[in-house]
Image (tube, rainbow, N blue to C red):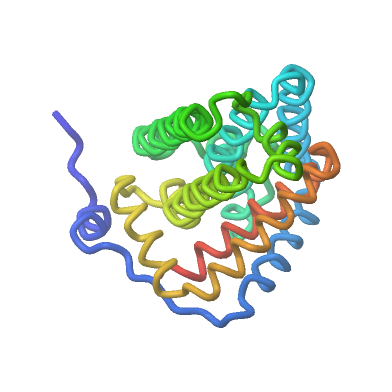
Amino acid sequence: MPLEATPGERCEKISPPKVRSVFLGQPFYWLSAGWRDLRTSPIASIAFGLLFAAVGDVITVFAWRSGHLFIAATSGFFLVAPLLAGGLYEISRRRESGRSTAFFESLAAGRRNRAELAKLGLLLALIGLSWERVSTLLFVLLAPHLAPDLLVLIAAVPTNPEYRPLLFIWLVSGGTLALLVFAITVVSVPMLLDRQIDCVTAMRTSLRAVKANLRVMTLWAFIVLTLTVLSFATLFFGLIIFMPLIGHASWHAYRDLVE
């Protein structure tokens, strides 16, 4: 027989969590709190950063000869990054209650609510696959004589202005998709690790939190994008520090935004 939900769980499923409005400068507090978490659990936190950097470098080694494959693999990697950062959320969650967390202990976070986490992971994977197909289709329709490669496109634009619309559409499409993923995951992933809640409710709560704090979340998205670009510029080595910092800060963003 299925286990009966606790009163708290039944209430949470019936009444969606309420979201808060926060001050514009709150993302800087999130970064400060994330940095404290990183300093408190440096070995476990940096271990996640090393894993992210290693995956990024592996993608570079095996896909750098094919710009299209490199862009697709890197985009997919960062699309699922919020889920992969679950261990970092667990470190911050345990630190709130005064507990320290080793690397392997933090991996236990994925066991809670894993069915709903798997559903969200599948959705993110489908989004990544769809983006790769849409990207290829844009090249086929608008630049059939050009390899489906963003780096080739950027190199061709100065001498072939007719490719500018394609570059603009590609960037707008990719940016819009990235913002959508950000909006549905910025709160939902730590919430799924923290509460017995379904992924649809978690994503809707995330969207409501973004809507209620549009300027704040725009600033937070810009900060995350800046740190990600810096990580690219350092051949992913910046992820060793930036990824744990973003992960811990994202936990504090969730705690501030959701009652």
In the rendered image, is residue 125 in sight?
Answer: no
Query: 178 or 111: nearer the eye?
Result: 178
Residue at the far left: name it. Answer: 1
The residue at the point 64 percent across, 79 percent down is 25
* Picture layout, residue 149 above or below residue 102: above
The residue at the point 33 percent across, 70 percent down is 18
In the picture provided, is 189 more to the left or to the right than 199? right
Percent position of residue 202, x then y: 35, 53
* Picture layout, residue 63 above or below residue 194: above
The residue at the point 54 percent across, 40 percent down is 79
Q: How many numbered badges does the structure rendering display?
A: 0
Percent position of residue 76, x then y: 56, 33
In the picture provided, is 20 more to the left or to the right than 147? left
In the picture provided, is 65 more to the left or to the right than 173? right
Query: 81 or 95: nearer the eye?
Result: 81
Query: 2 or 120: nearer the eye?
Result: 120
Residue 67 location, quadrant: top right
